[in-house]
């Protein structure tokens, strides 16, 4: 249960801080700024990787979990429990924000600035880049260590900086699903449920081409039972 608790808590922190920054920015007339929102998402993921990477791998994202599974680094029997834990954490975070900011219309939900097709394409590419970086710097199915924390947190902040105004730079189905459900803003939700998953799966193929099969794919690992030395194999 420890990895599931870690995933739920880590995703709670991600959604509470990240979408909370969006809500506070809107409520305060833009004092957080777009740059501040992007940095918040990157920094909270960086912090969670340091805090939880050794416990659960710090996926915090169903697309990442499915990417690790597709790469053969994560056991299939653990995918559904991980996704359920991530959704639970995200939903609790959005519910907490609703209690704190009852007048917020969207609770930081991701909405396309242009057409849904544009945002769909953007989310696929953004998640492909994110998952490629994760596969390149992680050990087994774990995002852990100084390199992983800085690399993953930086790419999230970078992508949010330039793509946030276009699609919201979600890259994470539950990050979009939770505020959409709580605020009842389901506009174009299908974009954010499907595009990140497709992007993560595409990243596995790209990583295999760039690094070779042994560089990105490997035997499935159980973060709760596998030691750091074993995941290095």
Image: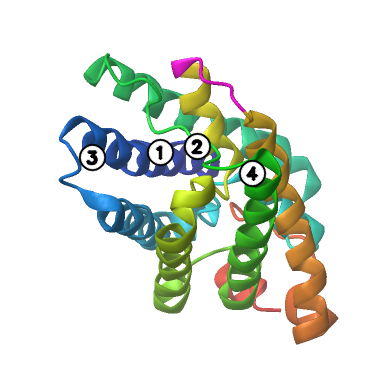
Q: CA distance from mark 3 to mark 4?
A: 27 Å
| Front residue of 140 and 87 | 87
* SS type, badge 4: helix
Side of 223 relative to 10 (left or right): right
**Which residue carries the number 3 mark?**
25
Q: Position of residue 147 (x, y in %)?
A: 44, 79
Q: Nearer the viewer, mark 1 or mark 3?
A: 3
* SS type, badge 3: helix
**Which residue carries the number 1 mark?**
15
Q: Magenta region, mostly helix, strand or loop?
A: loop
User: From this viewpoint, is residue 169 visible?
Assistant: no
Q: Dot 1, how many residues are within 10 Å of its Cα: few (below 14), some (14-19), or many (20+)?
A: many
Q: CA distance from mark 2 to mark 4?
A: 16 Å
Q: CA distance from mark 2 to mark 3?
A: 15 Å
| Front residue of 160 and 80 | 160
**Which residue carries the number 2 mark?**
110
* Label 2 with label 4: CB-CB less than 8 Å: no
Residue at (42, 44) in percent of width and height: 10
Between discs 2 and 4, the one toward the N terminus: 4
Between discs 1 and 4, the one toward the N terminus: 1
Between discs 1 and 2, the one toward the N terminus: 1
Side of 79 relative to 148 (left or right): right
Q: CA distance from mark 1 to mark 3?
A: 15 Å
Q: Dot 2, how many residues are within 10 Å of its Cα: few (below 14), some (14-19), or many (20+)?
A: many
**Which residue carries the number 4 mark?**
62
Between discs 2 and 3, the one toward the N terminus: 3
* SS type, badge 2: loop
Q: Which residues are magenta?
A: 183-187
Residue at (57, 50) in percent of width and height: 171
């Amino acid at each position: 249960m420890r990895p599931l608790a870690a995933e739920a808590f880590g995703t709670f922190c991600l959604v509470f801080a990240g979408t909370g920054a969006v809500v506070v920015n809107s409520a305060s007339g833009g004092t957080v700024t777009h740059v501040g929102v992007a940095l918040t998402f990157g920094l909270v993921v960086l912090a969670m990787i340091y805090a939880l990477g050794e416990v659960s791998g710090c996926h915090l994202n169903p697309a990442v979990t499915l990417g690790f599974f597709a790469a053969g680094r994560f056991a299939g029997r653990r995918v559904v429990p991980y996704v359920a834990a991530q959704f639970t954490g995200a939903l609790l975070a959005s519910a907490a924000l609703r209690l704190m900011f009852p007048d917020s219309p969207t609770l930081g939900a991701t909405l396309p600035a242009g057409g849904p097709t544009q945002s769909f394409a953007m989310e696929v590419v953004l998640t492909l880049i994110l998952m490629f970086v994760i596969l390149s710097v992680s050990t087994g199915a774990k995002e852990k260590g100084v390199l992983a924390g800085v690399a993953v947190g930086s790419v999230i902040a970078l992508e949010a900086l330039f793509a946030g105004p276009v699609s919201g730079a979600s890259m994470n189905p539950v990050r979009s699903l939770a505020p959409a459900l709580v605020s009842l803003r389901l506009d174009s939700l299908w974009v954010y449920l499907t595009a990140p998953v497709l992007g993560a799966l595409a990243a596995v193929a790209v990583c295999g081409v760039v690094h070779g099969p042994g560089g990105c794919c490997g035997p499935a690992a159980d973060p709760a039972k596998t030691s750091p030395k074993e995941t290095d194999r």
